[in-house]
Structure formats: structure tokens, C-alpha cells
Image (cartoon, rainbow, N blue to C red):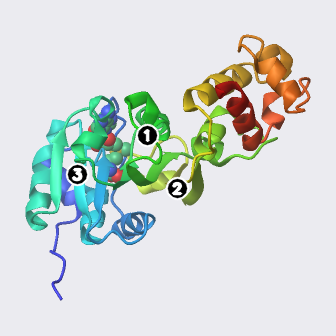
Amino acid sequence: MNLPPQLPPLREVIAAHGLSASKALGQNFLFDEHLLGRIARIPGDLAGKRVLEIGPGPGGLTRALLRAGAQVTAIEMDRRCLPALEELGAAFPGQLAVVEGDALKIDHGALMEGQPFAVVANLPYNVGTALFTRWLSPESDGGTWPPQWTSLTLMFQQEVAQRIVAEPGSDAYGRLAVLAQWRSIPKLAMKVHRSAFTPPPKVMSAIVHVTPAQAPAGVQAAMLARLTEAAFGQRRKMLRQSLKGVPGALAALEGLDIDSTRRAETLAVADFVALAGALSR
Ligand code: SAM
């Protein structure tokens, strides 16, 4: 059996390449290789599998993914990190491709050559949420469901992670929960203490692992997006008020026997799916 290559500690990599963390790029690095190894195991066995990593930075998570035997394509915006990533690629010949650029502007499906891939990322909060909602609705980029990604393993602020897995009736339950749960299964995989990062962010983090599920038949993703936007845009209001602007919604509520004096946060994900289904016909 080949032993994995010996790599310098991450702090030495940062020092050697002068990679001081940039606040503007939302850089909070992970150095604990034991923790990074645990994160890389969340998606399951990655040996020989294709992984899209967004924001590798100095490559801590990347090296854990490479050690797990993954074929990694990494998109990084900060060109200062590229020499360190190049060294890492040389230690794992043929396993790492690095693309310099903004992950929000790149067509991930084309980059991964139409093949299935797992996504793993420790990203700044705003970028992570924007990419997450895009991955949840491939139709908005001309794609279909099931998506090309086989799983998403993403670091979020803990509060956002809780919104993704939230259940009806809780304060955290809202649009993000419905969009994340109607045809995929999100799980809170791991909480990560702020002190694990350099520099430590202000809040706690958590990793969410998402796998796609079968989409309910006859429901347009765009209709569900519209409904949830209207319903949770005025979450304190009764549905008969918040859904007024969605043509046919009040009749659909009645047809489905959903009391229009209820508020959005009391509806199950299945209720939103049924409503969107009725309006997609
Ligand atoms: N993965 C490394 C780790 O865990 O230590 C770095 C994580 S750091 C929180 C986020 C990384 O994402 C940074 O390296 C940053 O430069 C990069 N980044 C930020 N916005 C990006 C974008 N739009 N596209 C690609 N990379 C981005």
C-alpha cells in the first residue's frame, strides 16, 4: 500500500506563502488536520470519486479530500493561494485541478464535464447561501432534477444550518427549510466551534450534509420558490393576506382544505408542495 505523502503543517504553508487571512474574502482557515479528516469523511467513501471544492484557500480541507482518494476540482478566487495549491497538487499527482475564479460565475456542471460530483466547501456565509440556493434549483441554470451533484457538504453559520434543517412551527422554519427539504434531505452533520478557525469568526458554525431525493411529480420549482417567497415574506400575516398576490393561491388553499387564516410557519413542507402542485397545473 502506498503511504500518503508527508505534507508540511498548514501553518507553515501559510507562513511560507504569506497567506494572511483576508476579511474581504471571508477567510477563516481550518488547520486542525484531525477535524479536517472528519469533515472529509462526512460525504462517505470518496476514493476515486469526483469532488468539487469551493474556496480551498491554503488547502487544508483539500489535502484531507486528496488523502481520502478523491479527484478534486477546486475553485479559488484568491490567487495568492494558487502556489500553495500547486504544491499540494504535485504531492498528489493527477488528483487535483485548481481553477482560479469566482464560483458564483462558473458553470459547475460544465466544469465537471457532465459527470456526477460531490460538493464540499467551507465558504464565506454570503457566498455559501447563494451557491446553496443555486444548487437546490438547477432549473434556474437550465438544469434538471435529480441534479448533477450527488451530495453537498457545506459549512454554514450555525444559525443558517438550523434554518436549513428546521421543522414547521419553529422560529428557524422558513423559505430556506422548504427549499432545502422538498426534494432533498439535509442533515446537521457536525457543529464546529468558532475557535477551530484562524482567525475565529464571531459565531459558531455547523456543517450540513444534503443528498437529493425524488422530486414530487408535477411541481414546478419556480412556483414553489414564488409561493414560499410570498408566504414567508410576510410570515406574521395570515396566508390569505400574504398569498394575495399569487394568482389562484387562495382557491388552491381552499381546494386543499388548508385554513387560510393560518400563517406560513405552520404549514408542513408537504403542504407547500401540494399548493405549488395545484398551481403548477
Ligand atoms: N477551505 C479553506 C479552509 O477550510 O481552511 C478556506 C476557507 S475560507 C472560509 C473561504 C475560502 O473561499 C477563501 O479561501 C476565499 O478566498 C474563498 N472564496 C471566497 N469567495 C469565493 C468565491 N466567490 N469563489 C471562490 N472562492 C471564494
The percent coordinates of residue 256 (x first, y second) are 85, 33
Q: Position of residue 73 (x, y in %)?
A: 22, 51
Comparing labels 2 and 3, the label whose residue is closer to the camera: 3
| Residue 22 position (above or below residue 115) | above
Q: Relative to 98, is 267 on the left or the right?
A: right
Q: Which residue is mark 1?
A: 144
Residue type (three-letter) at the residue carrying disc 1 = Thr
Q: Quadrant of residue 3?
A: bottom left
Q: Is residue 183 above or below residue 226?
A: below
Q: Residue at x 44, y 28 (%)?
A: 140
Which residue, given by chain and number where applicable, does mark 2 sit on?
Answer: 193
User: Which numbered dot is residue 73?
Assistant: 3
Looking at the image, residue 163 sits to the left or right of residue 119; the answer is right
User: Which quadrant would the C terminus be assigned to in this image?
Assistant: top right
Looking at the image, tell me whether mark 2 or mark 3 is earlier in sequence order. Answer: 3
Mark 3, other Cα within 10 Å: few <14 / some 14–19 / many ≥20: many
Q: Residue furthest bottom?
A: 1
Residue type marked 3: Thr
Which mark lies nearer to you, 2 or 1? 1
- In the rendered view, tell whether residue 198 sits above or below residue 239: below
N-terminal of the pair, mark 2 or mark 1, is 1
- Residue 111 horizontal side relative to residue 261, left or right: left
Q: Are marks 2 and 3 in contact (CB under 8 Å)?
A: no
Question: In what element is the residue under mark 2?
Answer: loop
Q: From where the camera sits, is residue 142 visible?
A: yes
